[in-house]
Amino acid sequence: MSQSRSRSRILNVRNRLLSGESSCETILKETLSRLKACNSLNAVLKIREEEAFSYARSIDKKIAQKQDLNPMDGLFFGVKENLVQHSVETCASSAILKGFHSLYDATCVQGMVKGGAFPVATLNMDEFAMGSSNENSVHGPVENPVYPGKVPGGSSGGSCSVVGSGALDLSLGSDTGGSIRQPGAYCDVVGFKPSYGMVSRYGLMAFASSLDQVGPITRTVEDAALAMRFLSGKDARDATSLDWNESGFDSLGGCELQGKSLAVPDFVFLDGLEEAVKTRFELSCEKLKEAGIRIETVKVKNIEYSLQTYYLIACAEASSNLARYDTIRYGKSLCEAEDLIHHYTQNREKGLGKEVKRRILLGTYILSEGYYDAYYLKAQKVRNLIKQSLEEVLSSFDGILLPTSPVLPFDVGSRLNDPMKMYLSDLFTVPANLAGIPAISLPLGSGVGLQLMSSFGSDSELLSLAWAVESVLGEQE
Amino acid sequence: MSYQAVAGLEVHVQLNTKTKIFCSCSTDYSGAQPNTHVCPVCLGHPGVMPVLNKSVFEAALRTCLALNCKVPCVSKFDRKHYFYPDLCKAYQISQYDLPIGSNGGLWIYPEGLDKEGRFIRINRIHMEEDAGKLVHTSSHSGVDYNRAGIPLLEIVTEPDIKNSAEAKAYLQALRQVLLYLQVSDCDMENGSLRCDLNVSVHQPSEPLGTRVEVKNMNSFRSVSKAMEYEIDRQIHTLENGEKIIQCTRLWDDDREETRMMRSKEDAQDYRYFPEPDLPPLSISSEKIQKVRQDLPELPRERYERYMKEGLSAYQAEILSSRLDLAPYYEDAFGQKTGVKLSGNFVITELAGALKNLESANLKLLETKEFSALLKLVEDGKVSQNGAKEALGELLTSGGSALEVVERKNLLQISDDSAIEAMVLEVLEADSSAKALADLREGKGKAIGALVGQVMKKSKGQANPKVVNHLLRDLLSKNYGIEL
């Protein structure tokens, strides 16, 4: 893509460095003051200030010595607290892991660091990535940076909040049922969930292993694509990671919208779609049609069962993945128990939050003898049907278009005691996780996101399409 | 009323791969300090993922095919959940409904390899990870995770075993196959082979009885004992008009009895579900074909070959079961040493020396030196007794057969002219007069004294056969004494 058309925040910073306009230390100081200015959002947990300064000085030295820069040199990024980092406290915003320091770095963090970037801050989230409002955190709730009094969405609420506030240009999140895209929409930023396996999950504290995926949160599609160059690729430590050609993320330009076709699943317009979301969505559809895109409303068979299917599978897997948190091997014991069974029950009772326990109990029940076939197995079958019908649609359309969330960012505290209503905000994001396909949320303003999905493995094509769509819609400031 | 017993065995074997099943930690933890062979993966730290060790898959595949199991085109891993501190993730990665092998079996020969065998069906073979180990002290309990993630194969029979002799024969036969495949050390004492027993009794006309599981046996002998005890206990219970309760019992090796551990009501729900972190294994028929072709000779095949080569059933049975001794026979046989001599020497002398000589070490004896020694015996250069002596030396100090034989003056003189000179000397000596007189009187036994004289003169190195021959020759020629 030509520099003149670039909307990249990352390249902008890089150009300041290369032109000598600013030193990396200056850029760091600006970043730190922005991070501190958004303190009230409660998005930032820990800032690695000292290390960041020695990193900045090393970059400045490189520039002074006219050494070649790495593509991501000078970029300070944020990391969701469920992505482990060596010797940095990583507790997935849960009391049960308070004080836990990992012995290794998550592969995705390593990838960014290899590209030259520095993980300057760890970011608040819903405990173990379970939630849609970032209100389930041992560190307290995160606030929406754009719409005061509203939730930032979840579970990557902290990651989206810092990018939405402008404090950071890039943060890493994880998306199990919409946890990158839904808060991305609520904070008016770009949230990208790659195809399942496109980014290594090694070092991501598992919530639902068959649905989890790491992805970037940025202000522009171009920056998401830049990050994907360093996030994607086969990882020998993740047997489910894909051996995909990374170079696909190098160029985004050249996507001609004229003649492209997008499908809108008809279930979008069922009950529950808020009027404001509908209006914004339809308005952007009009703009895309003007740009020459053919948009058709289609029936996607069984997609209306997505949410139920998702919660059955996600809770089942979560009950398994979270069983290891017992404070025996790591994490501080939260109480003295008289015997082993009480050690388990009391520590887990104290250490895990309400929503997490709710899902563990549900998942345990779902996997129990006599219920497995009726729930888990059936859910897997429905999952396959949903996957098939999405694939079918994607075989005759270039992508699927729908709002990211059926509802606007809601008031802090308003849905906390109504889990079913809370879960509904993920209605449009879970199908992509069930099918393993890539999906991106583009900001339409007012906390509304436009979601684009495409076929499995076509991540770079989706980013190209999204980049062109972004051009038509205009960047949200 | 006569009852009959039915039993099945569940055997866990630790595979002897260099690294653990899902991480690259070394498996060589014996004698190591606790928690020194661990990493975030086998400790189940947050964010880690398992990656299957290819050697484990290969070893499992070899075992399945050697045990006549069917291997599916797709096999997968599942999670088995239970809470216990030795299980880092609170689930064990195991295999549930698509194990690597099923519907196999193994021939056993409880009454000897030359007698009729019985086919014990194997229901399934699956791969899984071992758990850590709890260590209790007076004040606290600790966990050692060195063992966590050691690869295991679980091999489960159908209820085809009728008595303790069959149980023992099955375990021995299974151990043999695994040793031949070199996939495990199969040492019950250090836990690399563990065995659970399922046993029930019933009247021949009735359906199978209620099954009781017995755990905690640490030798083949205790498996036999536990099975006998449990059969007696169950028959006794039924004869008293009581019912058998489905339960798990523990074998107490000191008191030689089983006792209740938990009843069926306490059985855990393991909540199995497919392991999402490991993609299913696709196994092509070409792969299966290749592994099958590369299987080594198995115990029964070797036994039959030995029989064909001319060993007795007894020798073939012993040699096919002693993987340590067999190479000595194989090498000697390959060097065209007589089968009888080779067989006898390996089984009687070599095995005997190993047993009786405290400092004997098989590692010091190279197979080619053993064959060279037997060749010397066959060529008449060393007597059998001389060879025994040399064998002892080779097993304790090593070295070459020829060098040892020479150093210990064990070489026989078979050179006719040298022995003839000695024989003539003895016959002409005054001390031989009595023997000559006796011989003239027809007392043939007197020749022994003359042989003895010659042997003494040769310092025991003359070949007795040659001495005998020449003596008779010269007695006839020079003294007219025909024997």
Image (spheres, coloured by chain):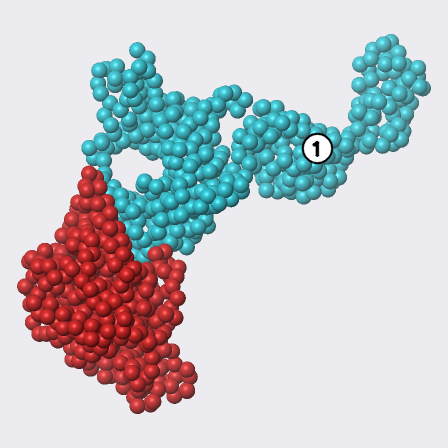
Chain colours: A red, B cyan
Q: From the image, which quarter does the C terminus of chain B lie in?
A: top right
Residue closest to the eye, A238 or A87: A238
Q: Residue A11 versus residue B395: which sits nearer the camera?
A: A11
Please state the chain letter of the residue tagged with numbered disc 1 in the rendered image: B
Q: Position of residue A171 (x, y in %)?
A: 25, 72
Report the residue at 75% width, 39% height from top: B406
Residue B110 vertical position relative to residue B88 in the rendered view, above or below = above
Image: A28 above or below A173: below
**Of the residues shown, which amino acid type is indicated by label 1?**
Thr
Q: Is residue B13 visible?
A: no
For the question of whether residue B134 can be seen, the reply is yes
Nearest the eye: B100 or A103 = B100
**Which residue is nearer to you in this view: A275 or B363?**
A275
Q: Mark 1 falls on what kind of element?
A: loop
Residue A458 coordinates in the image, percent (x, y): 32, 64
Within 10 Å of disc 1 (Cα), the crowding (few <14, some 14-19, many 20+) is many
Which residue is tagged 1? B337
Residue B168 rendering spot, x and y as whole percentages? 43, 27
Q: Quadrant of residue B369?
A: top right
Query: What is the quadrant of residue B396 in the picture?
Result: top right
Q: Residue at x 42, y 46 (%)?
A: B283
Residue B345: horizontal and vertical position, in percent? Answer: 65, 30
Left/right placement of residue A322 relative to residue B475 reads left
Residue at 18 percent across and 78 percent down: it is A476
Image quadrant in which the N terminus of chain B is located: top left
